[in-house]
Image: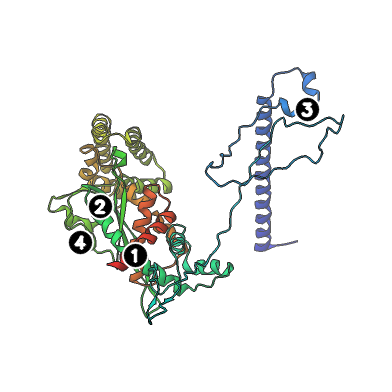
Amino acid sequence: MLFGQSSEKSRNKLENKIRQAEKRLAELENRLAAAKRCLQDDEPTVSTVEQAEPPVAVAPQDRPARRSRRQKLPADLPRETRRITPTVTVCPKCGGDLKVMSETVSEQLEIIRSAFKVIETVRPKLACSRCDVIVQAPLLPKPLTRSVAGAGLLARILVSKYCDHTPLHRQSVIFSRQGVELSRNTLVRWVAMTAERLSPLHDALNRYVMESSKQHTDDTPVKVLEPGSGKTRTGRLWVYVRDDRNSGSAAPPAAWFAYSTDRRGCHPQGHLAEWKGILQADAFAGYDALYESGLIREAACMAHARRKIHDEHVRRPTAMTTEALKRIAGLYAVEATIRGQPAEKRLAERQEKSVPQMKALFAWLTEQMETLSVHAELGKAFSYMLNHREAQSLCCEDGRVELDNNIAENTLRCVALWRRNCLFFGSDTGGQSAAILYSLLATCRLNGVDPESWLREVISCIYPVYHSV
């Protein structure tokens, strides 16, 4: 027999185990009762005698056909046909001749293993039989000087790193399994040299994006290795997106990335020094200097404001947070009906439906702030919306403006996925190379272009021009 504090502990542990067992038993009983109710609802009403009879087996052909959710394989894929003919040539029952009645076709998806190949360039030397002149065709320029990498291999490395988020050291291991030893340092050098070759396209994307009078911008942190210290510091990748498809524009969308060593406001101010129009962004203070001249108008992001309220609702749900989210959802419901429509129609619909909701939302927020502390999390979220009321309402004055800045945020997702697999950029040069390649590959994604095929063709075409300049 136990006495004192130890006996109390043992009794408490035993009582906890009993309560947990009773809870599990109650859950099982509830599940069993729910299953019985479902079976009773599915079965037709029959007499007690009929219910006691065992169920009659249903023939396979009498069962209702289940709707297959498997999608058909693309018709443009290469196909290999394998025919399996019966081993018998005459009827096994009567010995009569067999004729083709129909065929049963089944499909199986297979993958062809990617393989390396070596392209040997042979240049015969021709010598004159009368003099000492030797003639030989000039060597075609390579994508990278003094390198064995072809355009297809470079395209695969870049897409694997910046689209599929596979670090270079992992690619090196993958290549070694196929019998080709390519060190990580070699791959790093190839990526930097290819980015340098593609930099004119990066500049062209910058000019194209800046031609638009409305664009989206955002930034995200990236780790950069500090030379000589073995530590990392925080750099920044900025993105500027031209995408007016939601307002019915036929202009192709494009994204332009830029790298900086920090998040000072001088960087976006330098990027947009000669630009004017509507800038949809978050409330980063570094943009404020751009708005002072009046040449650039600020359009705020409702998603940022909603996220602050939603986070508080997840932590401490109240009737106030529920009502705020409900009112914001009403604005998004209007946006869903006008997405893809011309700017004029979008503006007309917003003035009819969104303007009253927007005014009611800000009036309600002002009223709620009288009962909230400005230091409370919900009070800060409401204050954020009220402080940016004018910028948040700009979408009700211009049909091209979006309700939020999700276009830029979605474009930056590739960098967020990269951070999960890669720890840092090796240097500022690596960050600049990433900005060039992210610009090109993100633009491919926005336009529905296969990035690897596009890069293969561009690298094949651009290196003779690069060498001829």
178 is higher (above) or lower (below) than 51: below
CA separation, marks 4 and 2?
17 Å
Mark 3–mark 2 CB contact (< 8 Å): no
CA separation, marks 1 and 2?
24 Å
Label 1 residue SS: helix
Label 2 residue SS: helix
The answer to which of marks 1 and 2 sits earlier in the sequence is 2
The answer to which of marks 3 and 2 sits earlier in the sequence is 3
Q: Is residue 205 visible?
A: yes
Residue 211, x across and y down, in percent: 21, 50
Q: Viewer-nearest of labels 4 and 1? A: 1
Residue corresponding to mark 3: 57
* Image quarter hosting the C terminus: bottom left
Residue corresponding to mark 4: 270
> Which residue is located at x 68 percent, y 35 percent?
104
Residue corresponding to mark 1: 464
Residue corresponding to mark 2: 208
Identify which amino acid the numbered label 3 is placed on. Ala
Q: Viewer-nearest of labels 1 and 3? A: 1
Identify which amino acid the numbered label 4 is placed on. Gly
The answer to which of marks 4 and 2 sits earlier in the sequence is 2
Residue 373, x across and y down, in percent: 29, 49
